[in-house]
Amino acid sequence: MPLLGGCDRQSGAATQQAESVSPANSSPNSAEAAPASGFDRTHRGTPIPDLTVSGLDGKPVALASLKGKPLLVNLWATWCAPCVAELPTLDKLAGDKAASLRVVEISQDSGEDGSAATKVKAFWERKNLTHLSTLIDPKGEASTKYAATTLPTTVYYDAQGREVWRLVGGHDWSSAETAKLLAETAG
């Protein structure tokens, strides 16, 4: 289950695209500077945060309203290379598991003036992503609620809206390991 690396929110978009394509830089100090990545189960049982973002149509969506079946929430951005790299496998997962799993993307692209929504809509159309639900969070509130400093960050919830695990960094969502991970429950 290879991790593709991650983007930190403190660096600029151009730096992210150039540096985050490989899993890790090979310099001796990169381990100290790189954000932690991998699976984290320390938040197991935590409820979905009180967070309202918007759809591409501008209508508000309360994250807690998405309970009812397992939910995979992915924080991403158009400028984040590992985020973009994993989108096709997330899209396929969303299509293959539509009856039993909801997959939601929350864009962390900034622009409260509507520019984030415009940017994400154009990106979505170019990539031809048809199964994912994408939401817009131009203020970055989701990153704050999840204490996410690295993108992508993905959080898996059971049908009752309790966190099961989270993954920091990119992932191949078409892998055999993914099926095992999605079989986990918080209870």
Image (cartoon, grey):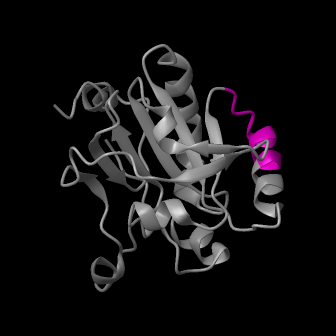
Q: Judge by depth and name the residue closer to the eye, 131 or 144.
A: 144
Furthest residue toward bottom: 29
Q: In which quarter of the image is the C terminus?
A: top left
In the image: residue 180, left or right of residue 8:
left
Q: Where is residue 56 in the image (x, y as percent from the top left)?
A: 75, 44
- In the rendered picture of this protein, how many numbered marks are placed on residues? 0
Look at 41% across and 65% down and name the residue there: 148
Compared with 112, 43 (above or below) is: above
Q: Position of residue 55 (x, y in %)?
A: 70, 43
Does residue 50 appear in the picture of this structure? Answer: yes
Furthest residue toward top: 99
Please report the bounds of the magenta region as a residue range.
121-130
Task: Kindly indicate the quadrant of the structure image that contains residue 62.
Answer: top right
Q: Judge by depth and name the residue closer to the eye, 183 or 30.
A: 183
Compared with 154, 28 (above or below) is: below
Look at 43% across and 29% down and name the residue there: 174
Q: Quadrant of the N terminus?
A: top left
Residue 27 highlighted magenta (yes or no):
no
In the image: residue 171, left or right of residue 57:
left
Residue 124 highlighted magenta (yes or no):
yes
Q: Where is residue 109 in the image (x, y as percent from the top left)?
A: 67, 63
Q: Judge by depth and name the residue closer to the eye, 134 or 60.
A: 60
Look at 33% across and 31% down and name the residue there: 178
Does residue 27 appear in the picture of this structure? Answer: no
Q: Where is residue 36 in the image (x, y as percent from the top left)?
A: 30, 67
Look at 51% across and 17% down and name the residue there: 96
Main structural element of the magenta stretch: helix, strand or loop?
Answer: helix
Task: Kindly indicate the quadrant of the structure image that contains residue 171.
Answer: top left
Compared with 15, 158 (above or below) is: above
